[in-house]
Image: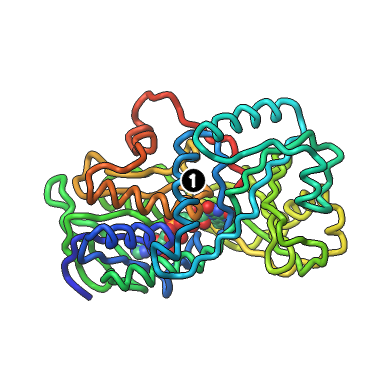
Amino acid sequence: MRNSAECVIIGGGIIGASVAFHLAKMGMKDIVILEKEMFLGAGATGKCAGGIRAQFSSEINVKISLLSEDLFERFSEDTGEEGIFDQVGYCFLVTNHDDEQVFQGLMKMQQDLGAPVEWLKPDEISDLAPNVRIDDVIGGTFCKKDGIGDPHVFTQGYVTAARRLGVEIYEETKATGIEKNGDKVTSVVTDKGNISTPLVINCAGPHAKEIGEMVGVDIPVLPYKRQISTTSPLSWIPEHFPMVVDIASGLYCHKESGGLLLGWADKNTAPGFDQSLDPEYTDEILMRALDRIPILEEAGIATSWAGLYETTPDHHAILGKVPEVEGFLCANGFSGHGFMHAPGVGQLMAELIVKGEPSIDISPLSITRFAEEKEEIREEQTVI
Ligand SMILES: Cc1cc2nc3c(=O)[nH]c(=O)nc-3n(C[C@H](O)[C@H](O)[C@H](O)COP(=O)(O)OP(=O)(O)OC[C@H]3O[C@@H](n4cnc5c(N)ncnc54)[C@H](O)[C@@H]3O)c2cc1C
């Protein structure tokens, strides 16, 4: 293992991989990624549902999504690696008039920022998503630029392209400490030796807080268990079946291996690193799915799994420099949308580091917001 680097990235999920690729593409040399597991993408990235959307309720999230969707679209061109971004769209089902008002207001904001979001009538939703019950649906927002992507394929794509540009990746290597001289980062301590470096980027997903503790900074990111189940193949799923989000129940679903992937975020889960499969959680997902898609009564369950969301108090990421510690940056706390934001986050972090300023103002996502009495940024659509 090398003993010095221009930059050490802690965490080899899709965020660390994208940040490394974009830094190397912008000319930075001697970049190292440390990953404690045997392979990259073994954390939250490997548990992800693959949803990619621009329909958010804060402007900053819409902007990062639109940038990321553009980058997903031209992934092969930028990286030389194949990506799979199936732009089947995202459809949010609205079943009451309060939500109708909220979502129509959000649609206007999203359209103003350039997202091609439209309002669909119930029969138009049915055409896109057959067998989804619409008897109580007033309408829904739909964005055709949204869709689903394969987290493994995109992570591997960034990793391969980053390696080609000289990035070194150390698997099964855990960062155990960060050394400072005064307020300046000087090196990363690992279980395989030390790497001296002036720059450390925290890309540790649900473990972000532990990395912050190494430099004495509180990073308010907590891990929350989230579960997913998939059905066996279903004959009636068309190629264009979109991601469907039932706002009232929180159920989300999209096509997966000929069947459906079903998910739901249980907001009552206590924080913790437990990733065991909870049968009651699975039942809650299936109940919501049967209510919205009754024909699933005939379907079998193919597989279920649990993973961790890395959640901040306002469900927005923490991006950029940490003022108290020179040379320490964060790309953390994506609260369930780190996969879809990874391309944009990688580019913006690299621009901040290499050019001094990112092309989108990421100051609303600064870690300082938790200490300042700023008007809160909020994210309502936290279902996925
Ligand atoms: C069930 C589920 C469904 C989801 N669905 C979606 C979705 O549809 N769309 C979407 O955009 N997002 C979704 N997400 C969220 C998304 O998966 C995450 O936001 C994203 O993967 C975060 O990527 P990351 O690289 O920051 O974290 P991770 O993938 O967790 O990577 C962090 C890495 O850091 C490593 N690490 C930690 N500590 C250390 C250390 N001390 N030393 C070395 N390495 C360390 C870990 O092993 C890990 O590999 C979902 C998440 C879950 C759990």
State the residue at coordinates (38%, 59%).
18
Q: Is residue 272 among the parts visible in the rendering?
A: no
State the residue at coordinates (73%, 53%).
285
State the residue at coordinates (80%, 39%).
122
Residue type at the position of mark 1? Ser
User: 217 or 232: which is nearer to us?
Assistant: 232
Q: Quadrant of residue 321?
A: top left
Spot occupied by residue 145 in the image (x, y as percentages of width and height): 58, 49
| Location of the N terminus (image quadrant) | bottom left
User: 280 or 353: which is nearer to us?
Assistant: 353
Looking at the rendered structure, the secondary structure element under dot 1 is helix
User: 213 or 71: which is nearer to us?
Assistant: 71
Q: Is residue 352 left or right of residue 42?
A: left
* Picture colour scheme: rainbow
Q: Is residue 179 left or right of residue 352?
A: left
User: 48 or 165: which is nearer to us?
Assistant: 165
Spot occupied by residue 272 in the image (x, y as percentages of width and height): 51, 52
Q: Quadrant of residue 286?
A: bottom right
Q: In the picture shown, does residue 77 fall above or below 214? A: below
Q: Quadrant of residue 115?
A: top right
Q: Residues within 10 Å of mark 1 (few under 14, many from 20)?
A: many
Question: Which residue is the site of mark 1?
Answer: 65
Q: Is residue 28 among the parts visible in the rendering?
A: yes
